[in-house]
Amino acid sequence: MENLQKFRESIHLNQLALAMRIGVAQETISAYESGRSNPSIGTLLKLCDELDVSADYLLDRTHISLSMERFLQKDLSEEELELLSVFRKLSAARQKRAIGFLMGMLYKGK
């Protein structure tokens, strides 16, 4: 969990303070960061909530600390979020048609 250590240090939080916040021993945080141990799902969720990062980030599956939901909420308008929500409910074939339709709208408008 290299990202755990990087992120913790970037916000100037020591192992003991983080451990106290989530209810584990400092040695437990050390073991996570060194790869000697992995957190339980419950502890992983506590870490995510406390640090406000995604589980994928803490598990070193991505270098992006923000969850996709938080990222989208920060950068997209209400209309864009609504469009994305509807798009995700479409079948793969209909998603392709929707993209084609929107591309057509884009180029016909010029």
Image: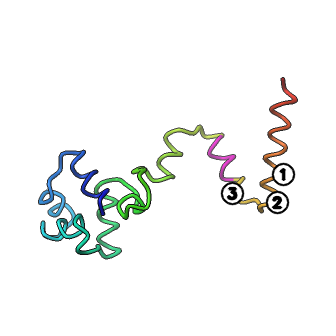
* Quadrant of the rendering where the C terminus is positioned: top right
Mark carried by residue 42: none
Disc 3 secondary structure class: helix
- Locate residue 3: give its quadrant: bottom left
Viewer-side residue, 5 vs 49: 5
Label 3 crowding class (10 Å Cα cut-off): few <14, some 14-19, many 20+? Answer: few
Q: Is residue 67 magenta?
A: no
Mark carried by residue 93: 2
Q: Where is residue 60 in the image (x, y as percent from the top left)?
A: 38, 61
Spatial CA distance of label 3 from label 1 is: 13 Å
Label 2 crowding class (10 Å Cα cut-off): few <14, some 14-19, many 20+? Answer: few
For label 1, the residue is 97
Viewer-side residue, 60 vs 94: 60
**26 with respect to 100 (left or right):** left
Q: Does the magenta stretch include residue 82?
A: yes
Residue displayed at 81% across by 38% down: 103
For label 3, the residue is 88
> Mark 3 vs mark 1: which is more N-terminal?
3
* Quadrant of the rendering where the N terminus is positioned: bottom left
Q: Is the magenta stretch mostly helix, strand or loop?
A: helix
Foreground mark, 3 or 2, reads 2
Q: Which amino acid does label 1 sit on?
A: Arg
> Mark 3 vs mark 2: which is more N-terminal?
3
